Image (tube, rainbow, N blue to C red):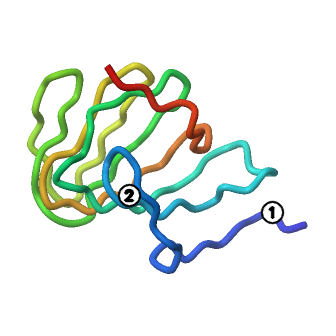
């Protein structure tokens, strides 16, 4: 077994998520460390939070805002944002975001108010 994993994110089939369309990488049973998601933000992105997951958003393309615990923050390419557990968040705008998820994505850890 290798000590590394290589994924081509732009070739992974997208799935719908609260933020838009995401391409999720490194979701294997033996990886308990981190997953990475290439997300195209949708106009109907929903505010949500996680109880266990920490996320970092890195803005790749576009401009818009992140709503973080009710506060709107302007974002642009090159910005990184650390989102801790229990922070209610959503992205707004025409954005492509690289999201790093620690520990890896767990579909049961998406919460809505």
Residue 36 x/y as whole percent: 52, 55
Report the side of 70 relative to 32 (left or right): left
Examine the rendered structure and indicate whether residue 46 appears above or below residue 12. Answer: above
Crowdedness near tag 1: few (<14), some (14–19) or many (≥20) residues, C-alpha within 10 Å: few
Q: Which residue lies under the disc numbered 1?
A: 3
Examine the rendered structure and indicate whether residue 53 appears above or below residue 38. Answer: above
The total number of labels drawn is 2
**Between 47 and 10, which is closer to the camera in this rendering?**
47
> Residue at 22% across / 44% down in the picture?
91
Q: Earlier in the sequence, mark 2 or mark 1?
A: 1
Crowdedness near tag 2: few (<14), some (14–19) or many (≥20) residues, C-alpha within 10 Å: many
Quadrant showing the C terminus:
top left
> Residue at 40% across / 50% down in the picture?
17
Quick check: marks 2 and 1 in contact, CB under 8 Å? no
Residue 87 x/y as whole percent: 34, 23
* Identity of the residue furthest to the right in this view: 1
Q: Which residue lies under the disc numbered 2?
A: 98
> Where, by quadrant of the figure, is residue 48 drawn?
top left
Report the side of 5 relative to 86 (left or right): right
Report the side of 67 relative to 83 (left or right): left
**Element at badge 1?**
loop
> Residue at 12% across / 44% down in the picture?
65
Quadrant showing the N terminus:
bottom right
> Residue at 40% across / 43% down in the picture?
56
**Element at badge 2?**
strand
Residue 49 x/y as whole percent: 39, 27
> Where, by quadrant of the figure, is residue 96 drawn?
bottom left
Mark 2, mark 1: which one is toward the viewer?
2
Residue 40 x/y as whole percent: 30, 62
Residue 102 disc label: none
User: Rounded to the nearest whole Å, what is the CA distance between mark 2 and mark 1?
Assistant: 23 Å
């Amino acid at each position: 077994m290798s000590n590394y994993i290589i994924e081509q994110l732009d070739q992974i089939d997208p799935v719908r998520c609260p933020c838009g369309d995401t391409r999720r990488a490194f979701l294997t049973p033996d990886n308990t460390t981190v997953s990475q998601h290439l997300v195209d933000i949708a106009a109907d992105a929903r505010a949500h939070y996680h109880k266990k997951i920490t996320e970092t958003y890195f803005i790749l393309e576009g401009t818009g805002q992140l709503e973080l615990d009710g506060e709107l923050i302007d974002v642009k390419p090159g910005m990184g944002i650390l989102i801790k557990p229990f922070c209610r968040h959503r992205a707004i705008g025409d954005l492509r975001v690289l999201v790093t998820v620690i520990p890896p994505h767990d579909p049961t850890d998406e919460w809505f108010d």
